[in-house]
Image (spheres, rainbow, N blue to C red):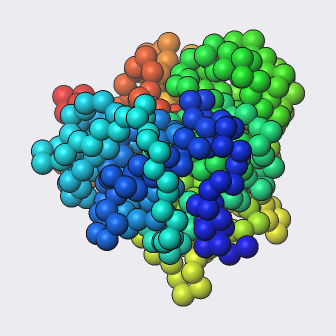
Amino acid sequence: MPLLKQLEKLIAYPLFPENDYIFSKYTYDAIYKIAARFQKNIFPADTEESICLCINDRGIMAGALIAALTRPVSLILPNAYSASVLERMHQAIAFSRAIVQEPIALPRDVTPVFFDRDTLGNDTLDRSFVRHPDSVLVKLFTGGSTKTPRIWSKTIRNLFSEAIHHAENLDVSSHDRIVATVPPNHIYGLLFSVLTPFVASASVVDEELTYPHEIQNAVKENQGSILISTPLHYKMLAGIPFKAESLRLAISSAARLDAADSRFFHQKTGLGITEIFGSTETGGIASRLCNDKQPDFKLFECVDWKIAKDLLALRSDFISPELPVDPEGFFTTNDQVNIKGPDRFELKGRADRIVKVGGKRVDLDEIKSAITGMPKVKDAAVICIPNDSARENKICALVAADASSSEIRQYLKHRIQSYAVPRLIRIVEKIPVSSTGKYENAEIKRLLESISRY
């Protein structure tokens, strides 16, 4: 069915039993009442506007997205609600309104619009107009885990095509109960804990889950059938005797899944973790089932691919409109891969993680792998900082370890080339990560630069 027809059908509520719950606090009827309220009171009917959505409530977010299918608005989703993040977003997109549930520090001249979920009213959704699938629905602010933070647009086609794909590919249905540890203001959480369950009529446990016992309890008490989580949380679960008899599917994304953590999960639950490979700007690309090993990635059937100068190039409905494409519609990523079959590849690393030091090529990921191979090391982040005085790159490492920097250098001495050993190694208790488990690159760089000046 063409996407526009699917969207029209989705808006033509009631599709679902009105008293069935999709999120813990909301029936489908409530979601459409939320959408009607957005449509009537907040979203302009005839003026294009970008509005910041500072809400982690999945029900309100779902209602806002449904309403935005019928109004010329784009919803800005910050990766965090701190004053500094919102200010940087405001500098990039001059929004004048922000939807909030409680007072937060907003940029100057931004008006807060308070949304009270307890007073929904009885308005009905105006279904007379559905926007074109290629119009921008959401703008996502990334934290810059691998590059400078920036904003990526996602069209209606980008988001709903991918949500429908995941629902069909993973056999998500009304019988599923989803437990998610990822916030809905990130692309992974938006797709898997809001849009995919919505189009599949599945329900979601709408709780904020951080600690291992909270995740385990949520799965057990709600008889969760699908766990949506991150490598950071799977690593945390490796520290407890995790049991989840009701689970049929465990999904990981947002960063690389550690092989030891996936083996632990498989041993304890009998389930292999399905790892999704992709990015905010490209959308989902491929997946693999990690049980006692981490096999090659299998491309999604709806994604076309080719190799361009040893790099993975993609063509799909999930790609953000800002990305440059060749005449055939392919976008070339920075991901280096080895072809393993007609639809399979091994992920080698990123081209932008290879730098020159003293005229020699150095792979930052190989250095990280060498550091984390040391028994006393728990985690490490390796970056390159320009050395202005010598017009050279300086390799630096932030390391979470029960070892000194000199011990780490001695360990690396016999494992990598001398020019690849980090010039600066700073020992910390833990590496700064976001709520989805991605490295906070800006904070890591700040920590390393703060001592590199001395």
- Residue appearing at x 65%, y 72% in the figure: 5
Q: Is residue 62 visible?
A: no
Residue nearest the observer in this picture, 80 or 367 = 80
The C terminus sits in image quarter: top left
On screen, residue 282 above or below 364:
below
- Residue appearing at x 80%, y 29% in the figure: 247
Tell me where residue 14 appears, x and y as whole percent.
Answer: 65, 54
Q: Residue furthest right?
A: 270
On screen, residue 89 above or below 436:
below
Q: Which residue lies furthest to the bottom in this view?
A: 327
* Image position of 293 (left or right of 197): right
Residue nearest the observer in this picture, 333 or 85 = 85
Task: Locate residue 293: give its quadrant.
Answer: top right
- Residue appearing at x 76%, y 66% in the figure: 301
Q: Is residue 70 visible?
A: yes
On screen, residue 136 above or below 201:
below
* Image position of 389 (left or right of 359): left
Tell me where residue 211 appears, x and y as whole percent.
Answer: 56, 17
- Residue appearing at x 57%, y 81% in the figure: 329
The N terminus sits in image quarter: bottom right
Tell me where residue 424 appears, x and y as whole percent.
Answer: 35, 32
Residue nearest the observer in this picture, 435 or 131 = 131
Q: Which residue lies furthest to the left in this view?
A: 108
The number of callouts visible is 0
Tell me where residue 252 appears, x and y as whole percent.
Answer: 66, 39
